[in-house]
Amino acid sequence: MRRALLAIVVTAAGLVLLLSFKPHQVTDAGAPPAAVAQAPAGRSGESRESGDSDTTGDSGTTGDSATTGTTGKADTSGGSGAAAGRTYTGDAADTRWGPVQVRITVAGKKITHVEVVQAPDTNHRDIEINQRALPVLQQETLSAQSARIDTVSGATYTSEGYVASLQSAIDRAGL
Amino acid sequence: MTARAALATRHVEHVMGTVFSFDVRGTDDPEGVGRAVAWLHHVDAVFSTYRDDSPVSRLGRGEIALADCPAEVAEVLGLCARVERDTGGYFTARPPGGGLDPSGLVKGWAIERASGLLTAAGAPRHTVNGGGDVRLGAAPEPGRPWRVGVAAPPTAAGRPAADALATVVAGSDLAVATSGTAERGHHIVDPHTGRPATALASVTLVGPRLTTVDAYATAAFAMGQAARDWVEDMDDLEALAVTATGETWRTSGFHRHVPPELRGFLPAWPPR
């Protein structure tokens, strides 16, 4: 049972990536999306370069905390221009264990780095989940990308229901 | 856009009361997608029960004869009769208290044909997802199968996050269909009782062709727990179900469709 729970945590957390960030903006460098701010202008003229990401704080949970120095390590290192990554900070997604928020670095069409910005830590049980699940999240996403899915099968959604569906996030991501 | 990204076409089409997602790899030529989309709109015009003037609506009211309808109508009604027979009446195009409604088969049939149009147009590497029912074409790239996440349904044990999965199906040239309580906000009715089927939260069927697999999934949901033995007896068909209480079961060969690293999370078989 514990193993099953862990699997669900990992899967859910992995997919939070897909659901949370705003991938439809990946190719739209000219218009920073609501949830992702590009690197400060002047850092580089190269649009594909990694930038510190920021959240707008629309979830009310991150405020202005996310943008200083530490995000620098999310930059991919040593890559050529084509291989360099861009960072995206997702909205905080409400899981049944509490809000989870991640920042990803994307190079080409691959997620090359995952950083957990926010995770449930309000009690011991949550802490235990964090320690067990979140490192696995990073490992799974970074290596085998085993939670990576191309499409979703589920009970038929309506046109309206589609908007909030996992499939719509995948369609927007194009990953 | 990178060169690699250019060799893919994605398209989202709102039609038939739901949303169809196309993911085509290895080509940036949208011709096949255009044909498939035109086909779906044609199907909607012919088969919609929400349009009073559709041939199927008029046929249902007795205003026209089957011979007056486009040839596809007879084809679909023939398939409906076959599936009704296969499922012991748990699928029917003539629901209790209703008129003629082949919708439960039309979508899967239309997706199957759309997939064929893509292949014929030189785009065999694709997925077509119609509102959660999926036809996988040839693999996206050599050695890598498509991966289909099966959404975890709400059960008495709780409502999972919108992004939670029950399992992942990996494959190509394959159909994956899921029926569940949330289906279009309606219940699936057991045609034998006229009452909503309540034993399962969702059931996912995997088989070679969506034409029948989609309608089979609807029937399996109506069957409830009996669906396990029914699917087990069908050739080339496997099932994974989540029950209303949050338990899961699967048929004996379902694991073959699940990526090896995730098989450990499947329910036991034979069942305890």
Image (cartoon, coloured by chain):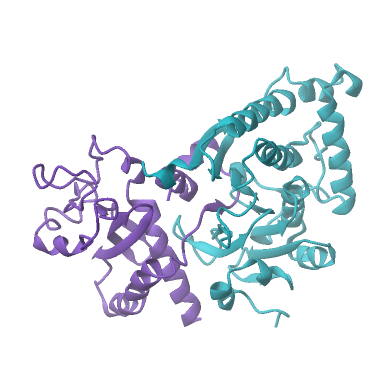
- Residue B189 left/right relative to A50: right
Q: Is residue B85 visible?
A: yes
- Residue A70 left/right relative to B14: left
Coordinates of residue B77 in the picture (x, y in percent)? 85, 35
Instruction: Say if A73 sits above or below B31 in the image.
Output: below
- Which residue corresponds to the image point at 71% horizontal and 63% vertical from the top-left? B239
Quarter assignment of residue B81: top right
Observer-nearest residue: B39 or A166?
A: B39
Observer-nearest residue: B9 or B240?
A: B9
- Which residue corresponds to the image point at 55% horizontal and 32% vertical from the top-left? B30
Observer-nearest residue: B98 or A66?
A: A66
- Which residue corresponds to the image point at 32% horizontal and 78% vertical from the top-left? A125
Coordinates of residue A57 in the picture (x, y in percent)? 19, 49
Coordinates of residue A157 in the picture (x, y in percent)? 56, 43
Q: Is residue B15 visible?
A: no
Coordinates of residue B25 in the picture (x, y in percent)? 54, 46
- Residue A67 left/right relative to B94: left
Colour that chain A carries in the picture? purple
- Which residue corresponds to the image point at 42% horizontal and 51% vertical from the top-left? A175
Quarter assignment of residue A172: top left
Q: Which chain is cyan?
A: B
Instruction: Say if B218 sits above or below A120 in the image.
Output: above
